[in-house]
Image (cartoon, rainbow, N blue to C red):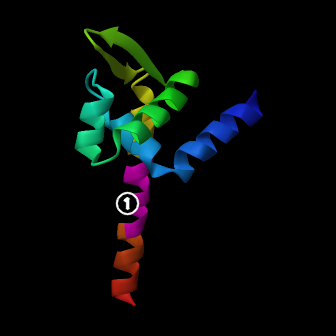
């Protein structure tokens, strides 16, 4: 099981599109089309990645009228990603400040 989770995490960070998709559905249910428009991506690519996220229980999919809407299975996933991004950003600022001092 740990190997499967490690592979999923590796895949998510290898392709930043997964992260962008996860964070784009952070606050509300959205369609694949709206995600594609927001991120300026091909809708087929978005659907394929959403299918992977659904399969791995990170995203829920439910029918609504003639479309599917997607939502996060657990918003903590995106919170963790954003926290990690903030940490990396903070590290870069500190490194930059150190370079300025030298």
Q: Is residue 34 visible?
A: yes
Residue 37 in picture, x, y percent from top left: 23, 41
Q: Is residue 73 visible?
A: no
* Quarter occupied by the N terminus: top right
- Quadrant location of residue 69? top left
Residue 43 in picture, x, y percent from top left: 35, 38
Residue 89 within the segment the image draws in magenta: yes
In the foreground, 69 or 27:
69
Q: What residue appears at the point 33 percent right and 30 percent down from the top-left corner?
A: 32
Q: Can you say whether 37 is above or below 102 in the image?
A: above
In the foreground, 67 or 53:
67
Residue 69 within the segment the image draws in magenta: no
Q: What residue appears at the point 54 percent right and 31 percent down from the top-left corner?
A: 52
Q: Can you say whether 20 is above or below 34 in the image?
A: below
In the foreground, 97 or 69:
69
Residue 76 in picture, x, y percent from top left: 43, 28
- Quadrant location of residue 44? top left
| Predominant SS of the magenta segment | helix
Residue carrying label 1: 90
Residue 9 in picture, x, y percent from top left: 60, 41
Q: What residue appears at the point 33 percent right and 47 percent down from the top-left corner?
A: 41
Find numbered disc 1 in the image and state the secondary structure of the residue it sits on: helix
Packing grade of label 1 (10 A; few <14, some 14-19, many >=20) is few
Q: What residue appears at the point 62 percent right and 46 percent down from the top-left corner?
A: 10
In the foreground, 91 or 33:
33
- Quadrant location of residue 67? top left
* Quarter occupied by the C terminus: bottom left
The stretch in magenta equals 84-92
């Amino acid at each position: 099981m740990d190997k499967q989770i490690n592979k999923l995490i590796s895949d998510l960070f290898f392709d930043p599109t997964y992260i962008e998709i996860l964070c784009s559905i952070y606050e509300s249910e959205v369609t694949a089309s709206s995600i594609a428009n927001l991120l300026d991506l091909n809708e087929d690519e978005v659907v394929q990645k959403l299918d992977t996220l659904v399969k791995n229980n990170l995203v829920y999919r439910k029918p609504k009228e003639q479309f599917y809407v997607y939502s996060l299975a657990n918003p903590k996933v995106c919170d963790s990603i954003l926290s990690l991004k903030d940490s990396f950003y903070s590290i870069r600022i500190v490194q930059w400040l150190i370079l300025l001092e030298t």
